[in-house]
Structures are given as C-alpha cells and as structure tokens.
Amino acid sequence: MTTANDTIRMTTAQAIIRWLSNQFIEIDGEELRLCGGGFGIFGHGNVTCLGEALYDVRAELPLYRGQNEQSMGFAAAGYAKQWLRQRFMFCTASAGPGTSNLLTSAALAHANRLPMLMLCGDTYVTRLPDPVLQQMENFGDPTFGVNDAFKPVVRYWDRITHPAQIIQSLPNAIATLLDPADCGPAFIGLPQDVQGWAYDYPAVMFEKKVHRIRRQTPDAGEIADAVGLLTAAERPMIIVGGGVQYSRAVAELTAFAEAHQIPVVETIAGRANMLDTHPLNIGPIGVTGSNSANAIAEQADVILAVGTRLQDFTTGSWTAFSKEAKFISVNAGRHDAGKHMSLPVVGDAKLALTALDAEMTDYVAPKDWVIEAQDHRAAWIRYVAENVAPGNRPNSYAMAIGAVNALCDKRDRVVAAAGGLPAEVTANWRTLEHGTVDVEFGFSCMGYEISGAWGARIAQAEREPDQDTIVFIGDGSYMMLNSDIYSSVLSQKKLIILVLDNGGFAVINKLQNNTGNESFNNLIADCPTIPEPFAVDFEAHARAQGAIAETVSNPEELGEAFQRAKAADRTTVICMKVDAYEGWTGEGHAWWECGTPEVSDHQKVREAHADWESSRPKQRQGV
C-alpha cells in the first residue's frame, strides 16, 4: 500500500513517461489510456533520456517513428480529431530544428482547438557546455531560445528547469488538453541535462488516474435570453460547427432541429453533423458552401451558432447575413461565444441544446420558411449531381469526389486540407454517416492530408479496423509533404490516397486570375524560372515508398481503381490528372475579403478590385 511518504527515485524523463502511462479516460463507460502513444524522431536532445524511458513502456505507449517532425504533429492532430478530442498523442523531437519543425503543427492544432502534447528537447540549464550544437543564442537574454517561439501557438507552455516541476506541470498540461473551453496543444521543453537528473518523486504521483471531460452547464439567464430571441424568430437558422461533434451532441442537435423545425447549415469543420439525406440539412455555408445554405443565411433573422468559431469562410467575411440578423452563440469557450455581438451561451453544446429545447415548449419555425429552405436544398442537390457526374468535359476534382462517394463505405473517413479540395469536398461530398469528414481548413495547412490521415487511421484502427481512411490531395500538397505514405506502409495502417494532379497550385492561380492578375508562379507551366516544365510521376514515387499505385485517365477508371484499393491489404495511391482551369465548382460561394491592389497599372486588376469592393457594403461590423 502506497503511503504519502513513499518515494520513487527516477529521472525526470522516466517520471514523465511513467506518469503519462498511468493516465486514463472514461469513454462511454470504458476506461482507455488517455494518451494513445506518440510520434517521435530521436536526436541528441531526446534520445538518451526520454528515449530510454519510452523503451520500457513501448507496449503501453507505442511510439511511431516519424519521417518529419511537422508531419508527426499533423498525424497527432488527425488522431485527436478521430477520437473527438477525448484522447491524444504526444510528439517528441530533438533540440533545435527538430523541435522548431513542430511549430506549424502546433499552430494547426491551436487553430483547430485540438489536444497534442509536445515533449521537446531544450538546451542545457547549467549552460556549462554552451553554445551547443543547434543552439540559437540570444545575446541579450540567455533564457530566450527557439522553444520560446511556441508560446503564441500553444495553450500551455513550460520549460522544466528542475525535476520537481513536473509534479505540477504535467497535470496542468493535461488539464489544458482536456478542457473544452481551452483545448489546444501543450508544449513542455525538456533541457538535455534536466531530463537525466534524478529526484525522489512521491509514489502517489504514479497511481492510476481516470479523467473525465468536463461538461459546463450553461447559465440559466443566458438560456432564457436565447429562448426569448429564438421563439420570436420568423426565419431561424442553426449553424453547426465541429464543437457539436466534440461535445458528442449530434443526436441532441438533430432532435432539437426536428422538434422546432429549424433549418440547419454546416461549417467546414461541422461537416458530417447531419446526414446528407436529412430533410433539415440545408447544406454547407460560406465561401466554400452551397447556394442553398447561403440563400437562407441572407434571409435568417435569428441564427443559432453551435460549436463554431465563426471563421471568415463560414461567414463570408461577415457578408453572408443580413445586418439586422441576431446571433446566439453556444460555445464552451467564452472567447468564441461572444463574437460579433452574439448573445452568448457559454457552455457544453449537448447541455445547452437540451436546456434550450426544454424551455422552447411548442415553438416551431414557420412552415413556409422551412419549405423555402428545403426547395433551395433540392436545387443544390440537383446541381451537385450534375457537377460530379462524368461527361464530355475535362476531369475535375468534383468528378473524382463523386466517383469515390458513390463507392465508399458509409463509415469510411474522408480527409482533405488546403488548396482547392477543401472547397470541392465541402460542396460536393454527400455525408453517409456522422463524423466521417475531416476537412482541415482551420489553419488551411498544405501537407496535412496524408499525415493527418495516417494519424486518423491509427485511431480508427483502434475501434473500427474494417473501415478505410480516404485522402483527397492535390499535386501541390503532395509535393510539400508525402513521406507518411512510407509511414503508413511501415506501420501497416492502410490509406487510400487520391492524388489529383492539376499541374501546380491551381486554386491560387484561380484566385490570381479572379483578381485580375496574370498566371504567375503557381502552375508549373507559368513559372519563368522553370525552362522546361515536366510532370512528376506520382505513381512511381508512391511505389518507391512501398505503396500500391496506379494512374487512371478518367473518373470511371478511378472508380474501378478505388474498388481495387478497397480490396487491397496496404496503402494504395491512385493518380489522375484534372484540369487547372475548368471544372471548378462554380456555384455556392459567398464573398470573401481578399486584399486586392487599390492602385495598379493593369486595367484588369483595377476592374477586379472595383468588383471585389462592391460587396463590402454588405459586411457586418462587430467585435
């Protein structure tokens, strides 16, 4: 029996890992290890001490060998999304460039409110060997180093300068990772000498602990105010974001919408809150949305936003709504709940929706409003069906999406990020099951696709090993970060990857052209520094990383290849060329504020600026 006076002498690194391996979480009545393991690349800043500690718990905390620190962070984010923020992975990197490579991943996790723990090497506390390899010296402040760069992009930051500090630091970091209101990445800097220092830790520190994620009850007064506004609405609308899924409130959302017959639209992060076939699902909203959702957004008088941070792609840079419309924002985070003069309801989405429903009694939205919304949705469904159908026209993203959507299992997970594919997937993908779409557009980070899918597949294999993880990726993102094809093959975590090659950064070329500029430095063919452009052989490259790979010529062949990939036993990469100019989804867009030149020598640029600015009077102003 452990007593309060019992101690165990171990190194700082050993104590961190032993403590981490004894943290559990209760999910649906089942106790699971809170940390699913980690992603690591060893170097002199973490191999000798942290590596030694991780070796002894390699069964409890499996360590996946990364190929790139940034991609490890993306994989950790994908894992956390798949587990609805209930479990997380750690990332460990060496001091110097190994750790600084994680900065972009930390920013992605921060923007998307995702838990990720970083255990990273740091320079020696004693400073006796300074300056050391890869140390970034600050001449005026020797305490200030590369790891301080993480402070703006994490929710919790600490540097351990004495072994005893982790007794407080570790619980604080985990509390941040599990807090719905403050969720985000946590960074712990581990100086190379401190990692190996020993300390007599209290034995009770290492006893098993079971965590539960807090559900904050919303304030009764805020609920009452929201009910008053909603029950007076003539054209109410619900915007649902990713927070609905993280709250596990999909059933409550559906029940609330059905009880009160309120049309529902989805953000990019909120895709897959409602099935495609639900009669109150009016489609995705915003810049990359649907005509149907944007049409009712313009007319709505009261908008209930649940679990969304109301990012500009959702709000059309705040032009998608009437200036007279009233917002109610349900969010666990106070910062998000009060945006743009919303009436805030600070609390858990599940509890808030239940409380609102209980107080709204017999309120039902006017029938003609619901019918109008459904008519808009029916028209959008017809448009999407035509948009994704193969025909006598160039290959497009939408055609590839349609071909896969028609053949995939309803529980397969779809992953996309950055470039043109987030818009195309958001607009054209038909949700077949809840929680099956991951479109990373919070930080819009190229390179997330394959790495994030690998992390999601690790998580998916823990609960649904028979389902597939499907990646849509453009050639630009593929070239930026593709090495986790190799990771997925090595770890036997099968992915199905669709590489859609349009010859460069085509969506930015599209933006360039739409703002009156000439094509320049986006498509490979338009780079003046490239004398002889040529295409990458993506099939050969994927094969070289151990994947099955093939190239197809059209959507019909892609569908046949996809079926072969479903039957395959390892990662498969399917490559298809798509047109860089034609085939974009032309409908469903809201205005987006994009800085255009106020003065220019080019007439087309001046005309585009005037056209762009003509929508600015619609922009709501708020805080």
Image: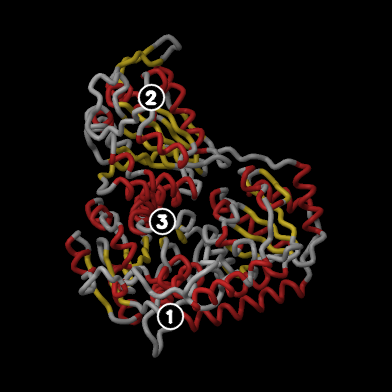
Residue 217, image quadrant: top right
Residue type of the residue flagged with mark 3: Cys
Disc number placed over residue 445 in the picture, else none: 3
Q: Disc 3 on helix, strand or loop?
A: loop
| Residue at image coords 76%, 75% | 368
Mark 1 and mark 2 in contact (Cβ < 8 Å)? no
Q: CA distance from mark 3 to mark 2?
A: 30 Å
Q: CA distance from mark 3 to mark 1?
A: 23 Å
Q: Residues within 10 Å of mark 1 (few under 14, many from 20)?
A: some
Residue annotated with mark 1? 583
Can you say whether 593 is above or below 526 in the image?
A: above
Mark 2 and mark 3 in contact (Cβ < 8 Å)? no
Residue annotated with mark 2? 160
Q: Quick one: label 2 or label 1, which is nearer the N terminus?
A: 2
Q: Nearer the viewer, residue 621 or 253?
A: 621
Number of labels in the image equals 3
The answer to whether residue 413 is visible is no
In this picture, residue 178 sits left or right of residue 231: left
Q: Nearer the viewer, residue 606 or 623?
A: 606
| Residue 442 screen position, x and y as percent | 49, 55
Residue type of the residue flagged with mark 2: Ile
Q: Quick one: label 3 or label 2, which is nearer the N terminus?
A: 2
Q: Nearer the viewer, residue 409 or 604?
A: 604
In this picture, residue 210 sits left or right of residue 11: right
